[in-house]
């Protein structure tokens, strides 16, 4: 039996991570990059990350010419020790667009490195992930949280493909803080990604009855 699902993203970093974390499940992933047509992004105005992931999954399923189940991811962040006005939570792009007019990678890095500088150069944070699968009838969702993360004011280039924040985002690997862009795949799998992998695999196992 062929198990295939559309991962609703064009982000090369997220695509690589999704395939890598679920390589042992035998699920085939198609992405928006593989479609012969373009789908305009939806408005993501849900109450939280899981809600936004569900909105994305339903939207892209409805827009597909050839129907297949859709899995969507939505990621937000919560900064610790900052004023509420400086906490983007589920929309990290919004304050960047308000300040610069668009949220391209350069503007994202500039805005959040300036934010880190405002609070002394380092701001602890928590990454919040929402995931959802939709097939036209059934909705399956879950969430994951990754801590031991912080943003810093000094970028370390180049950024990892698909993750502009990686040049100002550091993760604690054992007892050492390392830029995301410099962390090896093995270090990510062992220290940062286990909560994400657990949720993703649980969703796919439940949906496909693996």
Image (cartoon, helix red, strand yellow):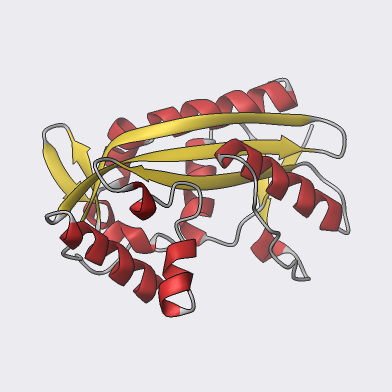
- The quarter of the picture where residue 48 lies is top right
Question: In which quadrant is the C terminus drawn?
Answer: top right
Nearer to me, 109 or 15: 109
Looking at the image, which residue is at 40% across and 63% down? Answer: 161
- The quarter of the picture where residue 153 lies is bottom left
Nearer to me, 113 or 84: 84
For residue 190, side relative to residue 119 (left or right)? right
For residue 42, side relative to residue 11 (left or right)? right
Q: Is residue 125 depicted above or below 166 in this figure?
A: above
Can residue 103 be seen here? The reply is no
Question: In which quadrant is the N terminus drawn?
Answer: top right
Image location of residue 69, percent across then percent down: 78, 41
Nearer to me, 98 or 62: 98
Can residue 32 be seen here? The reply is yes
Looking at the image, which residue is at 63% across and 27% down? Answer: 203
Looking at the image, which residue is at 37% across and 68% down? Answer: 108
Q: Name, please, the residue furthest toward the bottom.
A: 101
């Amino acid at each position: 039996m062929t198990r295939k699902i559309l991962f609703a993203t064009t982000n090369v970093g997220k695509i690589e991570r999704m395939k890598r974390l679920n390589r042992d499940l035998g699920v085939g992933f198609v992405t928006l990059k593989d479609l012969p047509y373009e789908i305009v992004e939806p408005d993501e105005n849900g109450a939280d990350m899981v809600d936004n992931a569900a909105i994305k999954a339903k939207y892209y399923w409805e827009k597909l010419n050839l129907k297949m189940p859709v899995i969507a991811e939505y990621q937000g962040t919560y900064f610790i020790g900052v004023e509420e006005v400086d906490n983007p939570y589920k929309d990290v792009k919004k304050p960047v667009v308000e300040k610069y007019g668009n949220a391209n990678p350069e503007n994202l890095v500039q805005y959040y490195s300036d934010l880190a500088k405002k609070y002394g150069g380092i701001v602890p944070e928590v990454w919040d992930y929402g995931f959802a699968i939709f097939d036209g009838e059934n909705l399956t969702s879950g969430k994951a949280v990754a801590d031991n993360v912080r943003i810093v004011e000094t970028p370390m280039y180049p950024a990892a493909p698909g993750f502009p924040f990686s040049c100002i985002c550091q993760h604690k690997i054992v007892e050492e803080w390392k830029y995301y862009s410099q962390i090896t795949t093995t270090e990510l799998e062992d220290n940062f990604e286990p909560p994400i992998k657990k949720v993703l695999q649980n969703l796919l196992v439940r949906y496909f009855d693996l």
